[in-house]
Image (cartoon, rainbow, N blue to C red):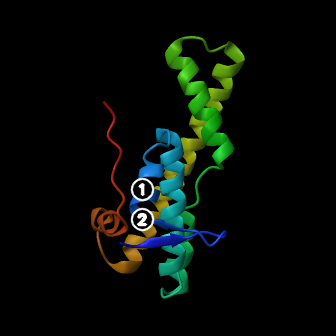
């Protein structure tokens, strides 16, 4: 079974790490997954042409964690119906930032798909990206 070596030189079974990650809140797990994906992309980017590597970095660049935490906090308040007018304005500002970042990301994905000569769907499959579904 794989192990992870920590700075303290303690070896931990991969399963123990996974079990620890399973205890994270959903938003914390999403942040971890994004950072893990970014690490994976950086490693793969070393073997890619510069144009592709640059696009992959842009694709994986997201909003800072503080903004995501603020969004999650305000989203919870919105659903609990305890949000103030000022908080609601801030929430809408963050929604606009997220939508803008998503649009830029799609643009970079389309550009990378063109560089590789494949469809956007194929690229998203290659990168392990799934479209979000909203109910």
Where is residue 129, by image quadrant? bottom left
Q: Secondary structure at mark 1?
A: helix
**CB under 8 Å between discs 1 and 2:** yes
Q: Position of residue 135 (x, y in %)?
A: 30, 30
Of 131 and 77, nearer the camera is: 77
Q: Is residue 8 above or below residue 88?
A: below
Per the rendering, the mark at residue 78 is none
Residue depicted at x 56% and y 50%? 101
Of 1 and 121, nearer the camera is: 1
Per the rendering, the mark at residue 18 is 1
Residue depicted at x 54% and y 11%? 81
Q: Would residue 13 be found to the left or right of residue 42 on screen?
A: left
Q: Which residue reaches farthest right?
A: 86
Q: Residues within 10 Å of mark 2 (few under 14, many from 20)?
A: few
Q: Is residue 60 above or below residue 75?
A: below
Q: Is residue 134 above or below residue 109?
A: above
Of 16 and 92, nearer the camera is: 16
Q: Position of residue 26 (x, y in %)?
A: 46, 40
Where is residue 115, by image quadrant? bottom left
Q: Position of residue 84 (x, y in %)?
A: 67, 13
Instruction: Identify the residue under disc 2.
Output: 14
Q: Position of residue 10 (x, y in %)?
A: 58, 69
Q: Secondary structure at mark 2?
A: helix
**Label 1, label 2: how far apart the Cα atoms are:** 6 Å
Q: Would residue 1 be found to the left or right of residue 86 on screen?
A: left
Q: Would residue 28 be found to the left or right of residue 9 on screen?
A: left
Residue depicted at x 62% and y 15%? 83
Q: Residues within 10 Å of mark 1 (few under 14, many from 20)?
A: few
């Amino acid at each position: 079974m794989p192990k992870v070596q920590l700075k303290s030189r303690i070896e931990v079974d991969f399963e123990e790490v996974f079990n620890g990650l399973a205890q994270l809140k959903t938003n914390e797990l999403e942040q971890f997954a994004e950072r893990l994906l970014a690490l994976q992309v950086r490693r793969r980017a070393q073997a890619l042409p510069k144009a592709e590597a640059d696009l992959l970095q842009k694709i994986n660049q997201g909003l800072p964690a503080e903004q995501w935490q603020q969004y999650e906090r305000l989203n919870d308040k919105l659903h609990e119906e305890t949000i103030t007018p000022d908080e609601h304005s801030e929430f809408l500002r963050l929604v606009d930032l997220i939508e803008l970042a998503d649009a830029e990301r799609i643009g970079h994905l389309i550009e990378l798909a063109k560089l590789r000569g494949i469809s956007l769907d194929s690229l998203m499959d290659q990168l392990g990206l799934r479209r979000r579904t909203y109910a």
